[in-house]
Amino acid sequence: MRAELTPAAVALVVLLAALLVHDGLTLARHRRVLAIQAAAFAAGALLIVFPEIARRLAHAVGIGRGVDFVLYPLVIWLVRESLLSRRRYHEQHERLTEMCRAVAMLQARDVRGESPAGRVGDPARPAP
Amino acid sequence: MPAYNEGERLTATLEGLARGLGDRARATTVFVVDDGSVHALRTDSLRQVTSPMRVVVARHPINLGQGAALETARRMALHPQWQPADGPFDVLVTMDSDGQHQPHDVLKLVDAIEGGADVALGDRFAGGSNVPSSRRIVLHLARFFERALTGLALADAHNGLRAFRPRAMAAMRIRQNRMAHATELLQHIARAAFGRPAHAALSLVEVPVSVVYNDEVRAKGQRASGAVAIVVDLMHAFLFGAEPSEPV
């Protein structure tokens, strides 16, 4: 098995290395994340420089091209991650809405100044 | 009544409402929800012009959207803390704060509820409104969309002027913070109108109302692109929304 150092392969490996260095500087406190990222990047670089590895793995599981062996799970993972992020965003937004609503109801006032004393705004009896 | 950056226009709307409701103003409470306006509402300026109505103002700390503001108002209106001393409200009405809805139309909706309907929806097309042609097209497309989605054959599917009997309003929990709340409300109404057992089903009527499209209303009104945002929001709710739970 020999290395295939095409210009595209070199550019991709340089890009991965640059991203790793950048994240190493900005995420220095998150060592576990960095370690996982470094391992994923190393595996990616290996598959780029030695595409025969991906090719053989692909053939072993019945996929025609080595690149597809990488792309298929990657797409599945990205779609799943995107949906999970959306769901988390939706849940956080609902919580934020309920918090804003609670504040609004707690501070609601009758413009005639006839706030229901002992009811809204009373910390002892917060509005639901 | 949701309000966002309405300023003097809200004051004029409330003043017109207090005047237009006549004798009924004294028995009316308006829940204004300031949806995180840049400049908070000045409640002291409202006091004089809204008499004898009772006006309660709540303010969202940040802008959430019209649907969220309506839901806040809905919860306040149903909560015993804000109800009159002699019991719950008889009729609950939603309307816009920019002056496009008329006080006499509010009374028509109230009459419809007092006449036996559980839900009364304003129909701007039957009421001789000066609807701009571009808006008319979008609203007619919305009718077909809502009919396909809810089964309700309405003449005007997206009118903010609506009235509910309290038991109907209790089933109208709004989770859509932005403009998709109108569709969500129709989904609730359809579920309740076609509900089983039949005696528990809500009755629905459409009432001709006149919506005024002046320059200010047109300037601030929804753009046609808002329809796309509504569909996206509905899709999000379909995918990620929690299952309907007990009414709040």
Image: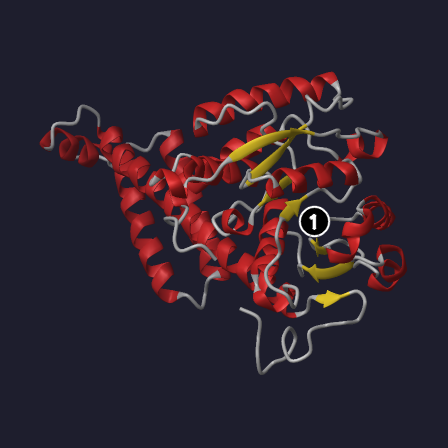
Count of numbered badges drawn on the protein: 1
Q: Position of residue B58 (x, y in %)?
A: 69, 61
Q: Residue at x 26, y 33 (%)?
A: A72
Callout 1: helix, strand or loop?
loop
Q: Position of residue B86 (x, y in %)?
A: 63, 65
Q: Residue at x 64, y 80 (%)?
A: A118
- Specify whether B240 is left or right of B127: left
- The quarter of the displayed image where residue A66 is located: top left
Q: Nearer the viewer, residue B7 or B32?
A: B32
Whether residue B210 can be seen here: yes
Task: Quarter of the image for the N terminus of chain A: give it.
Answer: top left
Q: Nearer the viewer, residue A43 or A86?
A: A86
Q: Residue at x 48, y 27 (%)?
A: B152
Is the residue B122 above or below the residue B8 in the image?
Answer: above
Q: Position of residue A105 (x, y in %)?
A: 63, 65
Outermost residue, left side: A60
Whether residue B233 can be seen here: no
Q: Nearer the viewer, residue A98 or A124?
A: A124
Residue at numbered disc 1: B1
Q: Residue at x 87, y 49 (%)?
A: B8
Q: Position of residue A88 (x, y in %)?
A: 42, 52
Neighbor class of circle 1 (other Cα within 10 Å; few <14, some 14-19, many 20+) is: many
Q: Looking at the image, what colour scheme do you see?
A: secondary structure
- Specify whether B195 is left or right of A65: right
Outermost residue, front side: B115
Amino acid at pointer 1: Met
- Which chain is indicated by disc 1? B
- Specify whether A16 is left or right of B162: left
